[in-house]
Structure formats: structure tokens, C-alpha cells
Amino acid sequence: MKSILFLFLFLFLINYILSLDQAHFHDYCIIGAGPAGIQLAYFLHQAKRDYIVYERSSQAGSFFINYPRHRQLISINKRNTGEKNRKFNLRHDWNSLLSNDDHLRFTHRSKKLFPSADLMVNYLNDFYRHHNLYIQLNITIKNLKPLSEQTTTCSSKDCSFLSTARFRMNDQYDNSYTCGIVIVATGLSIPNIPPIDGIDLAVGYENVSLVTEEFENKSVLILG
């Protein structure tokens, strides 16, 4: 009797663990809700694919909260090209995400050639909310590893076919996730400090002063 009970509990535990993996499984896992992550999520959403975006900050496009430091985008907001061809105009539009709705173009947000970076933050969040993209905020992904043995699992959105789990990762709460494909769209999240003598005496872009008076009558050497 005890052996039967033990076997029952063992099978129940295995089934429970597998159900947790299935609940956190997606065919496509995108890490980072910046322009690249949101754009990819849009096309996956349009194609009705099983995807999720994990963003460690409380809102999308968090890079643009701090950068560029001078709070102006360095990508031009070219509203007028002299042409009516939509594709031609998009090639000269450096800020808009691609979608079927031209009303969501960034060019409608500002008339300035170099708009405020704060507008980009608002734009990215408005874009993903408008399209109801699947983004989980305040999730920091860590310990991303390929699975030593690939397993098949029923997709959380469509059980008519089996998907292959190739990667496992955790969040800051040690919740486990499995994914078929992982796309890292985090961008450059930390400064790239070159290993050269004297670099410790330089002020990085992430810390440089924005007070122009501090550079009055001084020689400035810019590296990079």
C-alpha cells in the first residue's frame, strides 16, 4: 500500500513540474522591450505566433529614459521627403516602427528634426499597448542555458501541435521558463569600456556632465 501511495505521489509531482514548465513555455521568447523587441513582437503577433517579451524595467524603451544624455534623439525625424511613395518615405523615417497603421508613425509626434528622447519612450509604450503585444514588465531574465536534452511540449496557445523546448532560463524570483527560440534584444545595457592604459582617468559618456559651462575654455578629447 505504501509503495502504491509513493508511486502516486511521485507521478503527481512529475506531472506538477511538467505543468509548470508548460505554463511558462513559449515558442518565441524575446528579452528586451526596446524598438527591436517590440518590432519583432508586432510581426509575431500579426502572424499569430506563440511569443512573449520580457522587460526588466517598469516600462518599454527604458534605454531612452537615460540616453542620449543630452535628451535629444540622434536619429532624424524626417517628416517631409518631397515624395508620396510610402516605402520611400519609410526609408527616410529613422524612428517609426513598421505597422499597418500609418497613424502610429513617429513623425506625427513632433515637428522637430531631432525630437526629445522622452517622446521615444512614450511612443514605444503607446505602440505596444495599441497592438496589445504580450510584454511582461519588471522581469529580469538570468541563467539562460540551452537544454542538454530537448523536450517536446504542448504550446500554451495551441495544443494541436508539439513545440520543442530548447532553452531554459530564470527570472529574479527564480521562476523557470522554457522557450523554443530565444531572441536577445537588450541592446548595449552597460558601458563598453576599452582595456587601455589610463581609461580609469576618463569620464564615461554615461557620467559626463551636461552643464556646458564646465567645459568653458577647456580642451576636450573625445574617445570613440
Image (cartoon, rainbow, N blue to C red):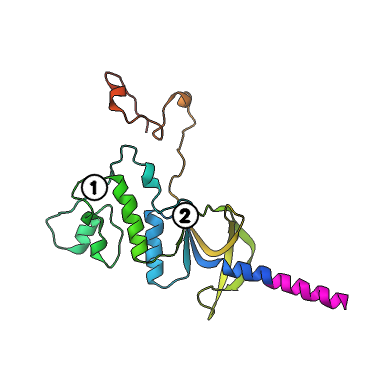
- Counting residues from the start of the chain, the first of labels 2 and 1 encountered is 2
Q: Which residue is mark 1?
A: 76
Vertical order, 89 against 18 (above or below): above
Left or right side of 94 for 173: right
Q: Tell me which residue sits at (40%, 48%) in the image.
A: 62
Q: Residue furthest left?
A: 82
Q: Position of residue 89 (x, y in %)?
A: 20, 58
Judge the density around disc 1: few (<14), some (14-19), many (≥20) Cα neighbours within 10 Å.
Answer: some
Judge the density around disc 2: few (<14), some (14-19), many (≥20) Cα neighbours within 10 Å.
Answer: many
Residue 4 lies in the magenta-colored region: yes
Q: Which residue is mark 2?
A: 55
Vertical order, 217 against 105 (above or below): above
Q: Amino acid at mark 2?
A: Glu
Left or right side of 115 for 134: right
Q: Amino acid at mark 1?
A: Ile
Q: Residue furthest bottom?
A: 160
